[in-house]
Amino acid sequence: MESPRSEMMLIDGIWRNASDGGTVDVENPANRAVVATVPKATADDLAEALAAAERVRGSWSETNSWQRSAILRRAANNIRERLDEIALLLTEEQGKTLPEARGEVNSAAEQFDWYADEARRIYGRTVEGPLGSVRAEVRHEAIGPVAAFTPWNFPVMLAARKLAPALAAGCPIILKPAEEAPSACLAMVRAVADAGVPAGAIAAVTGDPAFVSATLLDSPIIRKVSMTGSVRVGQILMSLASKHMAAVSFELGGHAPVIVCDDVDVKAVAALAVRTKYRNAGQVCVAPTRFLVARSILDEFEAEFTRASAALALGDGMDGASEVGPLCSARRHDDFAALVEDAVSRGAVATTGGVSLREKLGGHFYAPTVLRDIPADARVLQEEPFGPVALLVAYDDLNEAVELANNTQFGLAGYVFTDDVSRAQLLSERLRVGMVGVNTFAIANAAVPFSGVGLSGMGAESGAEGIQMYLRPKTVVTGISETLH
Ligand code: NAD
């Protein structure tokens, strides 16, 4: 058996080990073999990353935006050139299929392309106040050093969503990739650093997440915290950020409703929904989860959904025949299995799945699962399942569908399937979410904001809004003579 790869961290322009040599193991979720180790950052290592960020904050924010843009463009090109290498690491550690991994790396490159353009579009404005003798200008300045925390479900793309706008805005950024799947993210950071980002303006530190976050956010150097992950960790980071009043933005997951109206091509919508539901084994914050289906078409929808779910091929993401990979970790597998068991024990019916395939397939696999007749008190209706389960719920009229859709504290994505333009319009207005897909699940790309309401978080990533998270306004009011001499 091959010995595990030794990954390194990037601190002040140097790829290195932890100062005391400590490491953390990384597992392949498809076969549970240890495939890599990452350094376990010490307080000294983190202090060096912070000092380097502080040292370059002025020079990086003052770098001409056209220069920053050129660096980001090179970063996008480097990522694309290394796409195969990064995608293989991603599949090995995260479990998603290789085509999905390639798609993710490509989306990361798109973030850098998009923000290469946005870097040159940080516009201010001039405004007229009530007095004739002053002129006012509003400038947008880099907010300062950023601490970014990204999860394991899209370890490359979600890190790119923070690195690209932060660097475009002129902020140094210290990233902590998820320890469950760090290697692909570190390879992407290398591609970005190699594009010419100055030493200290980009760092990647690995290790114990609680220690890293508590140490970084204890420093007044950090002026912005951006995190994607669970509500639990978001709450911890928000309270740590309050110590020095660092700005925050969070993307904390969802529980997406899908309203399927009675006027659709039922089989076509079910087929599309199945293709989307099990992407990344369901570990997607905008995954369609609660299917609210008009009662008159529920049986047909359920039959097609169940048939297509049961037909999916599970296996190691490296195997070209696999359509769905394992869950990312033992913890994710067990938490997910417990949610399904809770629903079934309360009376929900699994029309397919409902079983772990860990014993059979060796990795953290769980069968694609469809549940119906789910009692209102089942935890899965309120907690984000983050795994391969579709919840089917019948509605009798569209007002009831809206009520069911909004009956959660999450509000990230929502979807509506109908051929009626008025229904589409009104339902998209009434869903309490940050993003609505009408007759599509493809709602996210680098050009449009990605954001949620309620427990789904605050702030936005991607789009023109994304860069604003790393800028702060500065007002300059200049007194002038009212006459021209
Ligand atoms: P978790 O909260 O235990 O861990 C998630 C990530 O947060 C880990 O990769 C870890 O690096 C990091 N983390 C943990 N403690 C931290 C701390 N104190 N400071 C900084 N980072 C810390 O969650 P989990 O068990 O991996 O997943 C549970 C739930 O999280 C899922 O059901 C899902 O709801 C949510 N989640 C959402 C997203 C998303 O894309 N929004 C991504 C991952 C997980």
Image: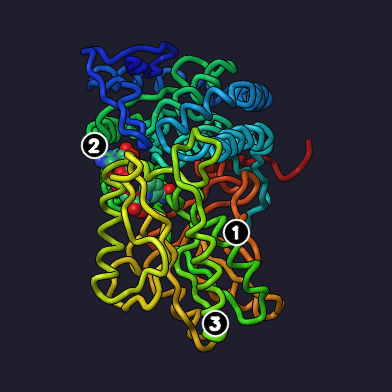
Which of the 4 image quarters holds residue 2? top left
Q: Nearer the viewer, residue 286 or 171?
A: 286
Display coloring: rainbow
| Residue 213 located left or right of residue 476 | left
The residue positioned 54% from the left and 82% from the top of the image is 294
From the viewer's perspective, is the residue at label 3 or at label 1 nearer? 3
| Residue 294 badge | 3
Disc number for residue 417? none
Percent from the top left, x then y, of residue 97? 51, 39
Gap between marks 3 and 2, in whole Å? 45 Å
Q: Position of residue 363 (x, y in %)?
A: 34, 40
Secondary element under disc 3, as helix, strand or loop, is strand
Task: Assign a secondary structure to mark 2.
Answer: helix
The residue at which mark 1 appears reads as 441
Quadrant containing the C terminus in the rendered view:
top right
Please tell me in which quadrant of the rendered image residue 358 appears. Answer: top left
- The residue that mark 2 highlights is 210
Mark 3 or mark 1: which comes first in sequence? 3
Residue 90 position within the rendered picture, expressed as x and y whole percent measured from the top left: 47, 31
Q: Amino acid at mark 1?
A: Phe
Residue depicted at x 44% and y 64%: 390
* Ligand 1 closer than 8 Å to label 2 CB: yes
Question: What amino acid is found at the position of numbered circle 3 in the picture?
Answer: Ala
Structural distance between the alpha carbons of marks 2 and 1: 34 Å
Decide if residue 449 is on the left or right side of residue 232: right
The disc, 2 or 1, on the residue closer to the chain's N-terminal end is: 2
Task: Please indicate, yes or no, whether residue 268 appears anywhere in the rendered image.
Answer: yes
Q: Secondary structure at mark 1?
A: loop
- Residue type, mark 2 in image: Ala
Which residue is found at the position 60% from the left and 63% from the top?
271
